Amino acid sequence: MLRSINNRISQVHLTSNVKQTIVAMLGVTFGISMYVFMTGFMTGVNNAQTDLAFSSLAHIRIYNDGPADNTNLAKKIYPNDIINLRNAKIIKYTEGIKNAASITSALHNQPDITDMTTQVNINVFFKNAGNKVNGVICGVDVFNENKVFNISKYMVQGNWNELKYRADGIFVGIALAKNLSLKVNDNLNVLTSDGVTRNYKVIGIFQTNVTGVDKTKAYITENAARQLLAVNQDYVTDIMINVKDYNKTQPIVDKVTKLTPYKVESWQMANQQLVAGSNLRDIIAVAVSLTILLVAGFGIYNIMNMTINQKIKEIAILKAMGFSGKDVTQIFLTEAIIIGLIGGVVGMGFGLFISKMVNRVPFNVSGLHTLPMAYLPKDYVLAFLFGLVTTFIAGYLPARKASKIDPVTIIRG
């Protein structure tokens, strides 16, 4: 019965000064909506950047890391002797990955690996008439390459699957095609570092929106690349792997390292600047959003404090009538929670509305058509819970102050 009376008093306080109540709710609404928007926007930016990076970057890469420093083997064998070598040469080492089939077969048994492809990458010169550009030819397994990198969606001209049937066909990046004045069905001359030259026919143009890739890269079939190098059918330079969760690559790297003598490298290890930039944006987004919520909490605290000061005589009368300090605390705490609940629900809705509007803003840069935005349920839940906790604390402190009021002192004036 007493609890029901306390709730009725809380309702009267909230409805007796509607403007003040609305201002308090707007503080919560603004804080939560900005938190939802900022976290969604920063997550969207990070996801967009990651998608762009993974257009040519696998989650895990296996490759031959090259030779150790063997320029002075005599010194290593006889460290205490005086040895003077002139014009020392590095001992030739085995390039690429040998017996790739046995490695890929072992990798297929790893449950966390979703897709995998092999590549034969060759540094070459692309020549067309008088133009010459330094770049890379990537010999690929057409089907698996598309599974790992989804390259078919970046095709501007031509069909990705056509490469499977054209041993003389080549796909070039859009910037490379522009620099060499190339169009579909034009011939392109390729020159390797060993002096091998071969002509290919341009059957397609792609655009990943990664400048370094679009300006220097071209695709041919894996067998065509092996023929260009004059190597056997089991030779590859890279094994590219995608996993279920690209943020959790280290445990898989540790497992794969035991299966191969070659270098196993996660995308985080190879792109630490990308990871650092993403983490910094997350920190900034959380810091700004939490600051907004804290400011909203101080606003609610001030409003609740003003309400208590305005109703100081009513509180004294309630205590004189037999209401305990606990009852007074409950009355004002109920008001704060109601403000937090209504403000939180409206804030989530308003935050979603702002996010949808921003997500429609044109932004034709790097393949993006609109500003990126992410809609993660956990962001909305966290925003609502944090807003509720903030309003609870902001209401509890003034309520506790009100519960300690001495009614005799107030009534006497």
Image: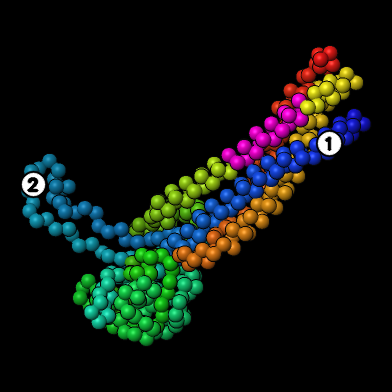
Q: Give the farthest residue toward the right.
A: 1
Judge whether residue 116 can be spotted in this image: no
Badge 2 or badge 1: first in the primary sequence: 1
Say which residue appears at 23% left-offset and 79% top-offset: 130
Three-letter code for the amino acid on which mark 2 is drawn = Ile
Colour scheme shown: rainbow
Eyeballing the image, is 50 above or below 165? above
Comparing labels 2 and 1, the label whose residue is closer to the camera = 1
Q: Could you tell me how far apart the alpha carbons at marks 2 and 1 are, in whole angstroms?
A: 96 Å
| Residue 147 picture location, percent across and down | 49, 70
Along the horizontal axis of the image, is 53 left or right of 200? right
Q: Secondary structure at mark 2?
A: loop
Say which residue appears at 28% left-offset and 75% top-offset: 126
* Residue carrying label 1: 16
* Residue carrying label 2: 83
| Residue 70 picture location, percent across and down | 19, 54
Q: Which residues are magenta?
A: 291-309
Three-letter code for the amino acid on which mark 1 is drawn = Ser
Count residues near mark 1 (Cα–Cα under 10 Å), then give few for <14, some for 14-19, many for 20+. few
Along the horizontal axis of the image, is 96 left or right of 386? left
- On the image, which quarter does residue 216 sit in? bottom left
Q: Secondary structure at mark 1?
A: helix
Was residue 215 drawn as part of the magenta stretch in this picture?
no
Residues 68 and 279: in front is: 279
Was residue 296 drawn as part of the magenta stretch in this picture?
yes
